Amino acid sequence: MNPSAQLRREIADRVAQALLASGEAQEVWLEGALACGFAHAASDIDLRGIVAGTLPAWESRIVDGIRVDLQATAPQRAEELRRLLRSFDVRRDDLGSFRRARASMHDLMCLRTALSYGPGRWHPVLDSGERQGYRRWAVADQAEVAASLAEDLTGLVEDGLAEPTDIVCRKLETCLAALDCAAAGHPVLGDKWLPLLASAPFHPPIDPARAETWEWFRPVQQRVTRALLDCWPVDDPVQKPPNLGVPDVGWLPQRYADGWFLRRGDVHVPITGGQLLGWLSVVSTDGA
C-alpha cells in the first residue's frame, strides 16, 4: 500500500469510528480501489453507511484536505445485491436477470470490494461464495462487452473504416484486460487500475491491418474463451465444432445457465462443451 493509500485508510478509520459512535450508521463500508489497497495523490475516499429507516442526506466532507464521499444505503438494497451474487440464472430466452445484473455492475463492484469496519480493523463484507458469484457476473459482463465490440469490428473492417476500427480495437484491448482481471478473481475497478490488477503478460495490440484474413482476431477469441472456461470448466471430450464458415470472422463464445453458445452479432449457435473445446482448438492453431 503506497503512502497515499495508507493516509486515506487512516482517515477512513476515523470517519467510520465517528459514524458508528454517533449511531448514524449501523455499519460502515469502505469501497472501491482504496478498499483494494490502491490510491493516488488525488484519490477520494468512498464510504457507505448501512442505515435502517430514513436515509440521511449526507454530503461529502473534507478531512485533512481529502474528500470523503459518503453514501447511505438501506440494508434491503444491500441484501438485494447479495442475492444477485448467489445465483447465475441467465437463459438465452430470458435475459432479465442478466439485464438487472449488468445495470447494477458498478454497485456489485462496490459490494465486491466492500470492507466493513469493526473495532480497529476492516473485514470483507462478502463470503467466498458471493465473491465467486461476482466473478461469474463480471466475466459474463465483459464477455458481453467484447461481443458487442466484435460486432462493430466486423462492420468497420468490412467497410475499410480504418480510424474507427482503431478506436474500437483499443476499447477491445481494455475490455480484454478487464476480462482477464475478472477471470482471475479481481473486482473490475476503473480502467486506470487494470495494469495493477492484471496478472497476464503484455499482449500485443489488436491490429486488423497486419493480415488480410481474420486470423488476427484469434487471440481475442482465445482470451474470451479461456476466461469463460476459468469460471465454467468443461470436462467433456473434444468434439468437432459446428461449421461456421471461416471460424475467425467475429465469432465469440457466450455462457449462460442453459449452456454454451457461439455468437456473432445477433446470431447465437448452441454448442456443447466438447464442441467449444473443438472450436478453441481450431482458433488456436498456428497462424493466430
Image: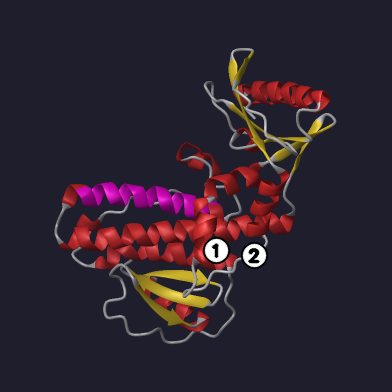
Q: Please report contact status of discs 1 and 2: CB closer than 8 Å, yes or no.
A: yes
Q: Quadrant of the C terminus?
A: bottom left
Disc on the earlier residue, 1 or 2 = 2
Apparent side of residue 233 relative to residue 176 in the rendered image (left or right): right
Q: Quadrant of residue 280?
A: bottom left
Magenta segment: 164-181
Q: Amino acid at mark 2?
A: Ser
Q: Residue at x 73, y 45 (%)?
A: 125
Is residue 169 inside the magenta stretch?
Answer: yes
Crowding at label 1, few (<14), some or many (≥20) Cα neighbours within 10 Å?
some
The dot on residue 87 is 2
Q: Position of residue 91 (x, y in %)?
A: 52, 73
Which quadrant of the structure image shows residue 51?
top right
| Foreground residue among 282 and 108 | 108
Q: Which amino acid is tagged 1? A: Ser
- Where is residue 99? Give x, y as percent: 49, 59
Q: Which residue is mark 1?
A: 97
Secondary structure that dominates the magenta span: helix
Distance, label 1 to label 2, CA atoms, is 10 Å
Residue 137 percent across, percent down from the top left: 56, 59
Can I make out residue 280 in this image?
A: no
Tell me which corner region of the image, top left, top right, bottom left or bottom right, holds residue 44: top right
